[in-house]
Amino acid sequence: MHHPLPLPRLTLLLALLLTNTPRSRYSDSSMPTFYIQQFGCRATQADGAAIERQLLDRGCTLADSPATADVVVLNTCTVTSAADTQARDAIRKLHTSSPTTRIIVTGCYAQRAPEEIAALPGVSFVVGNSHKPQIPDLISPPAARIATSPDFISLHALTAASAPVLTGDIFDQQEVLVAPILGGEGNHTRPTLKIQDGCNNRCAFCVIPFVRGKSRSLSPETVIGEVRRLSESGYKEIVLSGINLGAWGRDLSPRRDFLDLLRQILDQTPVERLRLSSIEPLDVTRDLVALFASIDRLAEHFHMPLQSGSDHILAAMHRWYRSEHYARRIEFIRELLPHAAIGADIIAGFPGETEDHHAATMHFIESRSFTYLHVFSYSVRPGTHAAALPNHVSPATIQRRARELRALSEAKSAVFHRAQSGRRLSLLTLRHSDSTESVEWTPTLSSNFLKLRLAGCWPPNQFVNAICCSESHRNYSAGVPALRAPAPMSAQGTKA
């Protein structure tokens, strides 16, 4: 069992750890440079964005890459064993290429198995989700605290075989452990605001409640204030995220309702487009869909985790719905929003899943108007109910079923893209990724989650009306500007 260290002692420990770095790696101001390497879901990315904003506010400098940073924060995921492996590989690669860089590992993997990470060469500190808000203090501790602290730590403490660990009981957390996000961190066009953390459900396959804790919500006043601040800063689209987003408000006193929160945001802020990251199917009510259909400021996009189309497997997973309940949600949406995007998470190869169960899932998806799937191969997570179940599926069978589901996802996506051809859409211009840089076209995103390549070089964070074309390029459809669209930018960044 790991024991959390007191914060003053821990702050001094990491201050000594960082000041032991060669002085040539620090800027003239003696403030460390940092880089945050992200893994995992939007909630994890929102945590990383908040840490970045806090460090910038303290005068630290964001490095261009891990290789040029004094300190690298690896913000990890642990939803699958592959996510754990990815994090370990990243640590080894970073330490090999930059042995003097200090590595702080945080996130869900750090909360679940801190000693496992602490034993890896190159790790300077392991910080669980329970103490993630303290990372800025650890990287850039207040000088007065260090100078006046009576709790001195000798330098031999820095040479232990394993890195120090800062973590505690995640179920003791009462607040959403994320600082306000002002937007733009990580060069994103669409800032994500995490308004809820943790989960009270106990799905058999899921380790997340044990690394994120119980469900807890930001206050409505905080949510509205942050959305207003982001909007007034110029951001056109804001994504609301949470581990169990639809559970927002149930832990507050008095209890609050997620649908009412959406109405308040629309009434009290100038946000131009609001998107939900993911929401449980039972939280997609007729009233929620009716609200989305009544106002174009809500993105026509519903991502509802399905996990399986077999009722037997859903019961074994401890999911709270059956396939007929999910099907009715699709009907609600299609009735009022025929062009909405409907996405789902699917797990291939849950313990006990037979070929008949897999076939039931394939049939359920084939016969309904999904637009895309996120397919996950089942992965044993220590401590979960599913880990102890009998009849685990062989890796080869899991891989084959996952391939079949991904092929079905591609087919569904293609049908949806073709159905949008000729429609006039309001597109948000995005920044190019490193792999798509081009002066001939601009990546964009529609309200219904279509990715389109818009002809011309357009500035990011602008709404452009365009006609969707049937032509496609990899993950993008083509878009042609409508007649009254604003002029695009030239390659030099001026209006053409």
Image (cartoon, grey):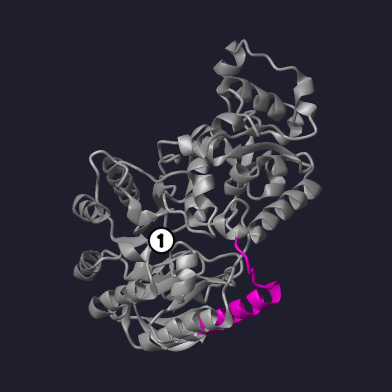
Q: Is residue 56 visible?
A: no
As drawn, which residue projects farthest toward the front?
390
Region rendered in magenta? 389-410
- Residue located at (31% from left, 52% from top): 231
Measuring from the top left, give residue 479's x and y in whole percent. 41, 81
Q: What residue did someone put label 1 on?
A: 277
Q: Is the magenta stretch mostly helix, strand or loop?
A: helix
SS state under label 1: loop
Q: In this view, does 19 lie above or below 254?
A: above
- Residue located at (42% from left, 58% from top): 190
Left/right of residue 100 with respect to residue 141 in the rendered view: right
Left/right of residue 326 with respect to residue 111 in the rendered view: left
Q: Does the segment drawn in magenta span residue 334?
A: no
Total marks in image: 1
Q: Is residue 12 above or below residue 352?
A: above
Measuring from the top left, give residue 456's x and y in whole percent. 46, 76
Quadrant of the drawing holding the C terminus: bottom left
| Foreground of the two, 104 or 279 | 279
Measuring from the top left, give residue 142's x and y in whole percent. 55, 22
Measuring from the top left, give residue 95's x and y in whole percent. 77, 46
| Foreground of the two, 399 or 478 | 399
Q: Can residue 483 be seen in this view?
A: yes
Kind of residue at disc 1: Ser
- Residue located at (63% from left, 52% from top): 382
Quadrant of the drawing holding the N terminus: top right
